[in-house]
Image (cartoon, helix red, strand yellow):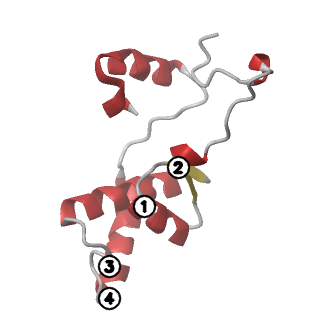
């Protein structure tokens, strides 16, 4: 989201950090252990990368899923199919942006402001 936000990224980050609807989590020790276990599992299975992606992307994707897992997330919003594959294995639902429901056109009040600014 921040990549696509362009010059508005700092404002979005400020809103995210103030909101109780979002939590920015770090890649800490627990997530590192989870990511290492995922890496080891795939190495043992003889398929370290699982995809044709470069190793750095594989590691970052597994880190994202590991953070979500240790933080107790039940859903990740992402268009990345590799993240979706890794998350599915961990029992985490992934919803892509095109799969989000369309806001009702005739009921604008039914659409909540995700950043809580209204």
Disc with the residue nearer the chain's start (2 vs 1):
1
Label ID, residue 96: 2
Residue 107: image quadrant is top right
Judged left or right of residue 21, residue 30 is left
Residues at badges 3 and 4 in contact (C-beta under 8 Å)? yes
**Where 71 sits versus 20, above or below?**
below
- Which residue is disc 1 drawn over? 81
Label ID, residue 90: none
Badge nearest the viewer, 4 or 1: 1
Q: CA distance from mark 2 to mark 3?
A: 28 Å
Report if residue 104 is visible in the image.
yes
Give residue 74's position: percent from left, percent from top. Answer: 62, 54
Q: CA distance from mark 2 to mark 4?
A: 30 Å
Q: CA distance from mark 3 to mark 4?
A: 6 Å
**Callout 2: few (<14), some (14-19), or many (20+) C-alpha neighbours within 10 Å?**
some
- Which residue is disc 4 drawn over? 44
């Amino acid at each position: 989201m921040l990549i696509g936000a362009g010059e508005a990224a700092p404002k979005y980050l400020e809103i995210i950090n103030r909101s109780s609807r979002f939590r920015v989590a770090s890649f800490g020790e627990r997530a590192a252990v989870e990511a290492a276990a995922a890496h080891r599992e795939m190495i043992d299975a003889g398929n370290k990368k699982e995809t044709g992606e470069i190793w750095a992307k594989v590691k970052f994707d597994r880190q994202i899923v590991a953070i979500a897992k240790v933080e107790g997330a039940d859903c990740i919003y992402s268009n990345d199919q590799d993240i979706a594959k890794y998350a599915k294995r961990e029992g985490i639902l992934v919803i892509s942006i095109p799969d989000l429901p369309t806001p009702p056109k005739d009921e604008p009040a039914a659409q909540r402001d995700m950043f809580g600014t209204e």
